[in-house]
Image (cartoon, grey):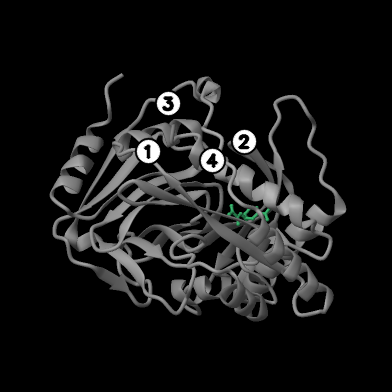
Amino acid sequence: MKSPSLYSRAHKQINEVKPFVLFRRPDSEILESYYQTDNSLNYTEDLTDQGFVMAPFDTQQKSILFPLSKSIKESERIISRDTEGYDQIKSKSIDPTSDKHIALVAQGIQKIKEGLFDKVVLSREECLTVDKKDWIKVFDKLLHFYPTAFVYIWFHPKVGLWMGATPETLLSINKNKLSTMALAATQLYTKTKRVDWDPKEKKEQQLVTDYIREALEPLGDHLKISEPYTHRAGNLVHLRSDINAEIDFKLITLQEIVQKLHPTPAVCGLPKATALQFIKKHESYNRAFYTGYLGEIVKDDTSKIDADLYVNLRCMQIFDEEVKIYVGGGITKDSVPEKEWEETVRKTQTMKKVLW
Ligand SMILES: C=C(O[C@@H]1C=C(C(=O)O)C=C[C@H]1O)C(=O)O
């Protein structure tokens, strides 16, 4: 099958050591790209600039922008393939040590029982040695495995190479309409079995919904929240509620809304400040862009902002002959450390599936 012509341009950017991003929005057949014309490193302070933004988890750190004014933007229709066929591929089995993560989760549960917070999302990195690869080809596999995800490959010579297939929208804004989602709880996907969610999982997802409701309610009218339903993300399923609102952008900016939402309890915890403090102190690695957000911000012909931002989950950072896969899960008082470990192992499969 013929490769999209956007790929050859992306290869050229890599050879010329220039930034680019290739991405495909959920359920879309359009592959999109930004190719920065120089290798400068640009930031966005207040999310008012047009371009493609890559924001870290840590809100104290700066967000990177591929400015529209310095980029060539292209798009191309891609032919979808039979994704189920790929299910035959088996990834190499790796058995990383679980003790550290299990101890971290146990410590989180203890703090919940002591009343420090209600929920905390704890994560880890998994480092794997890999042969040198054509990463655009790997991205192509990712596209066809995960048609309902936001799938991307992002490169900046001064920052690094990232790739992911995330099931989670941070927010999407079109004119005065905002949509987002509360996504939480995880089970393994099976073709035949009906999915039942237990009270612990429902509560975990409800906490995220309530947080988003409280953040958005004061900002406008017509807040609509769907009943939670099962959403498939590759080999996993989650509980998801869709949230829609009408926002008066004369009263609030995009940056202020993002600050209210990010990081949501789907990736941080509740209350936000204490959960964040615990994460920073006890997770013994740097999340960098994992659980940050990424996506496009543009203005329409009336200068109104259109934004389409996704939470950076099910992702990996790529080095010369190593990748780091980032995974985590929400912890509540009823969590069982060993099960939380297994959940992170399952989440690594999203990326491992395309590595071998
Ligand atoms: C933190 C991650 O995922 C988040 C945590 C989930 C959970 O706790 O079950 C489910 C979906 C995401 O909101 C991850 O994929 O690394």
Q: Which residue is mark 2?
A: 235
* Residue type, mark 1 in image: Phe
| Residue 107 rendering spot, x and y as whole percentages | 73, 70
* Residue type, mark 3 in image: Ser
Q: Residue at x 44, y 65 (%)?
A: 288
In the image, is 232 to the left or to the right of 52?
right
Q: Secondary structure at mark 1?
A: helix
- Pick the residue in front: 214 or 45: 45
Vertical comparison of 73 with 69: above or below: above
Dot 1: within a 10 Å radius of its alpha carbon, few (fewer than 14), some, or many (20 or more) residues?
many
Q: Secondary structure at mark 4?
A: helix
Does the CB distance between marks 4 and 2 fall below 8 Å?
yes
Classify the position of the C terminus by image quarter.
top left
* Residue type, mark 4 in image: Thr
Does the CB distance between marks 4 and 1 fall below 8 Å?
no
- Pick the residue in front: 146 or 245: 146
Residues at marks 2 and 3, CA–CA distance in whole angstroms? 19 Å
Q: Point out the tag, 3 or 1, that comes first from the N-terminus.
A: 3
Rendered image: mark on residue 139: 1
* Residue type, mark 2 in image: Asn
In the image, is 229 to the left or to the right of 323?
right
Rendered image: mark on residue 350: 4
Q: Residue at x 42, y 26 (%)?
A: 80
Q: Point out the tag, 4 or 2, that comes first from the N-terminus.
A: 2
Residues at marks 1 and 2, CA–CA distance in whole angstroms? 18 Å
Q: Which residue is mark 3?
A: 80
In the image, is 86 to the left or to the right of 31?
right
Q: Point out the tag, 4 or 1, that comes first from the N-terminus.
A: 1
